[in-house]
Image (cartoon, helix red, strand yellow):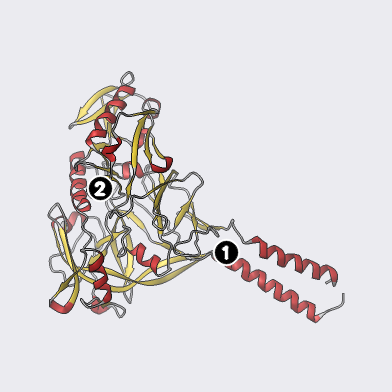
Amino acid sequence: MTSNPGVEFLIILILLALAVQLSVAYSGGLPATLLTLERVFPANQRVDLSFLKGRDRARHARVLQGIVGGVVDFSVFGTSDPYLFGLYYTKVKLGSPPREFTVQIDTGSDILWVTCSSCSDCPQLSGLGIELHSFDVMSSSSASSISCSDPTCVSIGRRSAAAECSAQGNQCSYSFQYGDGSGTAGHYVTDLLYFDMIIGGSSIANSSASVVFGCSTYQSGDLTKTDRAIDGIFGFGQQDLSVISQLSSQGVTPKVFSHCLKGDGNGGGILVLGEILDQTIVYTPLVPSQPHYNLYLQSIAVNGQLLPIDAAVFATSRNRGTIVDSGTTLAYLVEEAYDPFVSAITATVSQSVTPAISKGNPCYLVSSSITKIFPQVALNFAGGASMVLKPADYLVHLGFVDGAAMWCIGFQKAQDPGVTILGDLVLKDKIFVYDLARQRIGWADYDCSSSVNVSITSSKDEFINEGQLSVSSSSRNILLELVPLTTSALLMRILYWLLTFFSI
């Protein structure tokens, strides 16, 4: 075989081009970001239904007042059983050197805030078995307090009521007062948020981006109780000040996040700063210009039969509508829909169960599997998207009576007129995608203990699925299914011709 240096050099160039092409394809565009999600409360702690309703009532008081102030596999502890505390938290690292904080995941608010070291009345201990930390602006070499004249403060104040000017220290401040009497106040800080990023097949630790967040110097009410004390709250709302919006505007992550909450066993789940992909996901549009994740609920069907409910009761306005909120434990229906819903369920199963009442809640004594007795329920949304609920998605198990299992309606009558809230009871065992760029929410039934495929996008607002990532609690394997084959095939054909023609 005769050596031809020119041809050999050309072949090397083609091989290098192929390597670059595949590298680009495999790396995708924007990375996904890793956080770790855990239950706030242990799985072995049961509470009374009235307590859960009270907790949800307090939460909704603050949510409904409109007060604003790469691949992720969450190690989630606890369960979605609504009679266990259904709050979730994650750990974030802030500052230089980075320090870890435990913060509640909250899709009903926008601001990320953590306890400030200067807070004298904030909790020092937590009944959750976690060590509490506080943020010290002076101890972080990358931290900077935001002044009143800072364009960021001016911008926050112009877009919302979440900023005010503090004469003391010229700090851009916030004050959130909640309907249950609790609240927090503090000032805004900009510093580095650290996270793990998946770029193609590589996991890169200690990635970071500068974000604006709150440093809480005052807390009151339930926020001060040591039994549920944490370091702060991580708002996953869609407004500009939320971390998901900030990272998206910087081109760090796409403007979409997803979760899948496991409903049985020890619970668990996945929270992704990116778009989980599944062929069965259906989408419905978000109601525009709303502070929360409002959807157009149009009708409800039980066992395939539409309930006699006027669609007007689901209409959205400032204090009315249907909200998706992973921070709510139960689910709530407006009164005009609740009564027909319960009546339809009862009528369907009346020949197979014994009706009962437990603390005012409609219940049923059941001697066999609920999946064989109770009907499916369909929540029908705009765009032809239906959310089909299995019996376990609207019933809760309250124990046994004379050997029979007692199952109660998990949907509650709405505490606020005109407001329907879909909490963990409904959201569990489903993929949920919050596509803020396209202003839509999608869902699909899913085994949340399984791996998921996540889109790696090339632009913060463009969703070109160049690759998919498979994530599970035990492995993070890359499933690269979409490769730009046109250029690769052309290069391979040229390489084959050269090898054949020169008999190399």
Front one among 317 and 352: 317
Residue positioned most to the top:
351
Label 2: state its secondary structure.
loop
Q: Which residue is mark 1?
A: 26
Query: Crowding near pointer 2: few (<14 within 10 Å), some, many (20+)?
Result: some
Label 1: state its secondary structure.
helix
484 on left or right of 122: right
Give the residue displayed 36% in from the left and 52% down from the top: 76
Q: Amino acid at mark 1?
A: Tyr
Tell me residue 386's x, y (percent). 41, 39
For the question of whether residue 141 can be seen, the reply is yes
Give the residue displayed 72% in from the left and 75% down from the top: 12
Front one among 330 and 173: 173
164 on left or right of 198: left
Q: Give the mark nearer the N terminus: 2 vs 1.
A: 1
Q: Amino acid at mark 2?
A: Ser
| Relative vertical location of residue 482 with respect to residue 328 in this rendering, above or below | below
Query: Crowding near pointer 1: few (<14 within 10 Å), some, many (20+)?
Result: many
* Quarter of the view holding residue 145: bottom left
Tell me residue 163's x, y (percent). 20, 68
Q: Which residue is mark 2?
A: 317
363 on left or right of 280: left
Tell me residue 82's x, y (percent). 28, 42
Front one among 86 and 275: 275
Q: How many marks?
A: 2
| Relative vertical location of residue 116 with respect to residue 427 in this rendering, above or below | below
**How far apart are labels 2 and 1 at the CA level?**
45 Å
